[in-house]
Amino acid sequence: MKPHTDGWLHDTRTSYDTVAASYADLTRHILEEAPEERAFLARFADLVRAQAGGRVADVGCGTGRITAHLHRSGVDVFGIDLSPGMIEVARRDHPDLPFALGSMTDLALADDSLTGLIAWYSLIHVPDDEIGRVLAHFKRVVRAGGPLLLGFHVGDEAKVKTEGYGGHPMNVHVHRRQHAQLITWLDEAGFAVESHTTVTSAESRLGGMILARRRGAGSTWSAGGN
């Protein structure tokens, strides 16, 4: 059965406002237990540098842990999130980095203004019928040849999450998706997938990563196999 998605942006914002402080405490160090994810993030950072640097957006940045990791890798990165509570904690924990409120369904960024974009386990609350709009914004703001890195939960179902991160109440759909579906959506949106993998780690019991590039004139790199 297709999940009821009316008001999903409101539910996502409210849920993460509620859990923001606990989320930061519980996820602060889990990337240290995820070597394959760190490797993909390093490849993404290398590809940004290969594009002569430039700004990168961490869309759905939460409390900024991935934003900060990329910054330590030498990437000129800023974070965007739907939840004011998450942005407040991100600014508290990473005062040297820029964070802004915003929605991936309507990115307030100029066309071709980014070298790259990362959505790290942030598409998981977006309904299927909104994915095309989100990816169209990603393509619009990333310049030709720029890298896109997605992290997501692998599976075939959506479940409603009613409690999380310290037992606080939530009301969000968590969509698990297969690589093939996301690769199809990316292709339709104008991205060429360069590499993808499935992992089991502290980040996700069954997680996926897809590294792609925006198609178009000016594409200069290839990441190679799966």
Image (cartoon, rainbow, N blue to C red):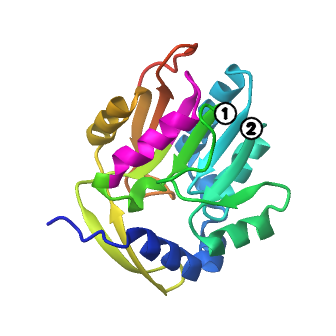
Q: Determine contact: label 2, label 1, CB under 8 Å.
A: yes
In this rendering, position of residue 63 left or right of residue 11? right
Residue 39 in sight here: no
Q: Main secondary structure of the magenta part?
A: helix
The quarter of the picture where residue 225 lies is top left
Residue at horizontal 61 percent and vertical 31 percent from the top: 112
Which residue is at the front of the view, 220 or 176? Answer: 220
Q: Secondary structure at mark 1?
A: helix
Is residue 135 placed above or below 12 in the rendered structure? above
Going 67% across and 39% down the picture, which residue do you hit? 56
Q: Secondary structure under badge 2? A: loop
Q: Is residue 39 magenta?
A: no
Tell me if residue 10 comes above or below residue 197 in the rendering. below
Residue at the (53%, 13%) spot, across then down: 217
Q: Of 203 and 164, which appears nearest the observer?
A: 164
Residue 205 position, x and y percent, is 40, 58
Q: Is residue 144 magenta?
A: yes
- What amino acid is labelled 2 in the image? Val
Which range is magenta?
Answer: 130-149
Say which residue label 1 marks. 45
Query: Would you name the residue on which mark 2 appears?
Result: 75
Q: Amino acid at mark 1?
A: Ala
Q: Residues within 10 Å of mark 2 (few under 14, many from 20)?
A: many
- Say which quadrant the C terminus sits in: top left
Q: Residues within 10 Å of mark 1 (few under 14, many from 20)?
A: many
Q: Is residue 176 visible?
A: yes
Residue 94, image x, y percentages:
79, 61
- Marking on residue 204: none
Vertical relation: 24 (above or below) 34: below
Tell me if 52 is positioned left or right of 170 in this view.
right
Place of residue 81 in the rendered image (x, y in percent of width and height, measured from the top left) = 60, 61
Q: Residue 97: name its quadrant.
A: bottom right
